[in-house]
Each structure stands twice: as C-alpha cells, then as structure tokens.
Amino acid sequence: MKKTGILTLFGFLFISTIIFASQPPSTIWVASDKAKLKTDVKASSATIAELSKGTPLSVLAYQEKWYQVKLPDGKTGWIYRGKISETEVQKTPGNEEGGSVGGLLGDLSGSNIRADNTDSSRSIRGLSPEATEYAKQNGTPQVYRNELDKVIERKVSPTEIDQFLKQGKIGEYQE
C-alpha cells in the first residue's frame, strides 16, 4: 500500500509540474516596436492596434503560437509569440527597432523571445567581439570576414522584413 501511495504522489507531482509549466505567464511585454494586435490568430486578420516596445500585456489565453492579451486600456486581441517577451522589456531610447548589440550572437539579454527556426524577424547587427576572436583563433581568412562585414552593413527596413515574412509564409504568416 505504501508503494502505491508514493507512486500516486510522484505521479501527481509530475502531472502538476507539466500542467504548471505549460501555463502561459500572466503578464508579457511587447518586444518589438509596432507589433500588431490582431482580431484573430492569423496575421491576415484585422489589426486592432500597433503596440510600442515595452507595453505590458495581461495574458488571457494561449493558442498555438499566439497569445490572447488585454492591453492596459482594456482592449483585447491576439499577438504573435515572436513579438513578445516573458521578461520585462524597457524601451531603448534612440533605438526604436530593437535591443543593443553585443554577445556572441548579439545581446539578446533584454528579450526572452521563444522562437523556432521560422519565427524571427530580428537580425544580428554585427559580429560580437567574441565571434571576431573566435574567427581569428580558428584561422578564418580575413577576406571571408571582410565579406561578412559587407553583408552585415546592409540595412533592411521593417517593411522589407514584413514583406519577406509574408511572401515566405514565415513566423506569424504561417497560416
């Protein structure tokens, strides 16, 4: 009888952990300027509002890759998970398009964005000092680093990124 009780207790704890871990957070923050609050879980649905980076959102529900949220002013709608952070995001003065640069893959510390390989509309802006040092230590020819620098210097507007995502049915446009 003791074995059954212990197994039942462990089973209950295991299931409780899974249920608790799968619950969406109660508050999330907008991680991208001009993130769109939609009427439905499709990118093609009507836009209710464009949100500023750092806006807190109360989570009402989570469906597939979309959060149903409530704004501080009471409006409700749906926002794609690639546009939010589960940790508080501060608006960066003078940098309306997203975080700072640094780290091996750029500084992503201000954002806790969950993304899979077709989710991100953010780009890394420049090689970090660590990546540059890694390239030097591993003998990456300077000509390759110079060509990479040329690619990194190219600028892509948020509108161009949005068009690319729509055409490729990537991220929030995967309908």
Image (tube, rainbow, N blue to C red):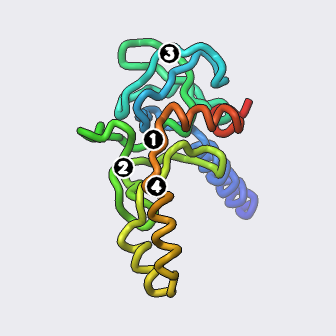
Q: What residue type is labelled 4?
A: Ile
Q: Which amino acid does label 3 sit on?
A: Thr
Read off the residue under disc 1.
Answer: 85
Quadrant of the image containing the N terminus = bottom right
Residue 76 numbered tag:
3
Q: How much space separates mark 3 and mark 2, taking CA atoms?
A: 25 Å
Task: Report helix, strand or loop for mark 2.
Answer: loop
Decide if residue 103 is on the left or right side of residue 80: left
Label 1 CA crowd tier, 10 Å (few <14, some 14–19, many 20+): many
Q: How much space separates mark 4 and mark 2, taking CA atoms?
A: 14 Å
Q: How much space separates mark 3 and mark 1, taking CA atoms?
A: 18 Å
Tell me, yes or no, whether the two marked residues, 2 and 1, touch with CB atoms within 8 Å.
yes
Q: How much space separates mark 1 and mark 4, taking CA atoms?
A: 17 Å
Q: Earlier in the sequence, mark 2 or mark 1?
A: 1
Residue 124 numbered tag:
4
Q: Which quarter of the picture shows residue 129?
A: bottom left
Label 3 CA crowd tier, 10 Å (few <14, some 14–19, many 20+): many
Residue 119 numbered tag:
none
Decide if residue 70 is on the left or right side of residue 168: left
Q: Can you give x and y, in whole percent of width and height, for residue 99 in the image?
A: 36, 47
Tell me, yes or no, whether the two marked residues, 3 and 4, touch with CB atoms within 8 Å.
no
Q: Check the image and report above or below for 12 versus 77.
A: below
Q: Can you give x and y, in whole percent of width and height, for residue 125 in the image?
A: 42, 55
Q: Residue at x 57, y 38 (%)?
A: 23
Label 4 CA crowd tier, 10 Å (few <14, some 14–19, many 20+): some
